[in-house]
Amino acid sequence: MASPMRILAFEVGAYFVRYTVFTGDKPGIPSTIATPTDSAESFYEAIAQVVKRRSKPIDGIAFSIPGFIDTSKRRTITAGSLGMLFNHDIAQELSQYVPGIPVWLENDANCVAMAEKLNGNAQNLNDFAVITVGTGIGGALFLDGHIRRGRDWRAGELGMMITDFSKGGLLPLHDYASIGSLVERYAAEFDVPLADVTAASLFRRLDEPEVRKIVEDWVDYLAVGVFNTVAVIDPECVLIGGAISRESNLVPMLNAALEKNKNWKDFRTTIKRCRHSSNAGLFGAYYAFMTEVAGK
């Protein structure tokens, strides 16, 4: 009987890189390093050091990275706030530091969807969308049993939809439904420093009418994004991700906001929170490697 593959998965963020080894489908305990941002070379060197510290050989490396990712060439086109990784042939360049180990990289929001398909709330679904709510609005489309990346690797950029043209012109959903926009609304309304406000704290004060009104107005914009997504792709389910999705009131408030739309009765779709939160990128990167490289 063949030994299970050992895949080293990385979730690359603006400030930290989290990583762990999957043996079979079982992850180890994640570890963290600071994200090297001065150059691609320093990034590769840091990854190589993680690989070399493993006590057993690694069969593959998988990355969850923000931005537009050309998976056919395993290269970045953009990389979110990680400017040092724009337009880099990651797999080819990294092979100079860790030769002989196959590499896969995937967009971070796509990894969230893949994590849900692997062992989350989409295991039995073939058509679903993920909307991640954080500093921006991320999105991923899993259709006909596969992640949908698009011709130019830009599919699922749900945060870029225009949702309030008469008021905000061409401002995208990012500007209305991100965590930052919620916090900014509260800070402006109550004239308090942004640093003193967290989105989670507002959800714990929903019994205060002024706070509830701010949160409900914010949820209304998120509901517009959900409705537009459902109207376009007709999924079995929409999953809401990001740390804020752990707030128990979010999905009920989102459903209530959708019910205010008279057309929702014709498009009504199940809305759930993602099962994975902090480890979604790691699980998704692993799933991507196993399906795209190992052919599992």
Image: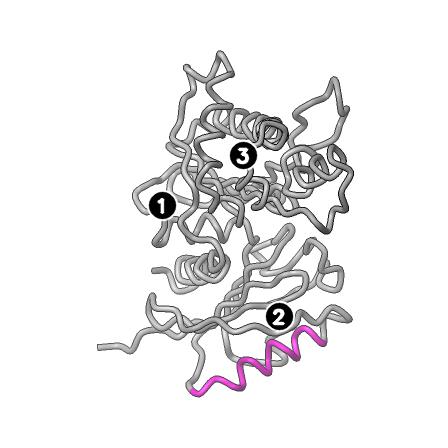
Mark 3 belongs to which amino acid?
A: Leu
Tag in front: 1 or 3: 3
Q: Which residue is mark 1?
A: 121
Q: Earlier in the sequence, mark 3 or mark 2?
A: 2
Tag in front: 1 or 2: 1
Q: Nearer the viewer, residue 210 or 89?
A: 210
Image coordinates of residue 201 in percent, x first then y, are: 58, 45
Mark 2 belongs to which amino acid?
A: Gln
Which residue shows up at 68% across the image and 27% down it?
Answer: 162
Q: Which residue is mark 3?
A: 206
Q: Is residue 254 rendered to the left or right of residue 28? A: right
Mark 2, Cα crowd under 10 Å, few <14 / some 14-19 / many 20+, is some
Query: In whole angstroms, how far apart are the C-alphas of marks 1 and 2?
Result: 34 Å
Which residue shows up at 56% across the image and 53% down it?
Answer: 108
Is residue 198 one of those drawn in magenta? no
- Range of the magenta residues? 42-55
Rendered image quadrant of residue 188:
top right
Query: In whole angstroms, how far apart are the C-alphas of marks 3 and 2?
Result: 51 Å
Tag shown at residue 92: 2
Image coordinates of residue 250 in percent, x first then y, are: 49, 36
Which residue shows up at 63% across the image and 35% down it?
Answer: 177
Which residue shows up at 73% across the image and 39% down it?
Answer: 187
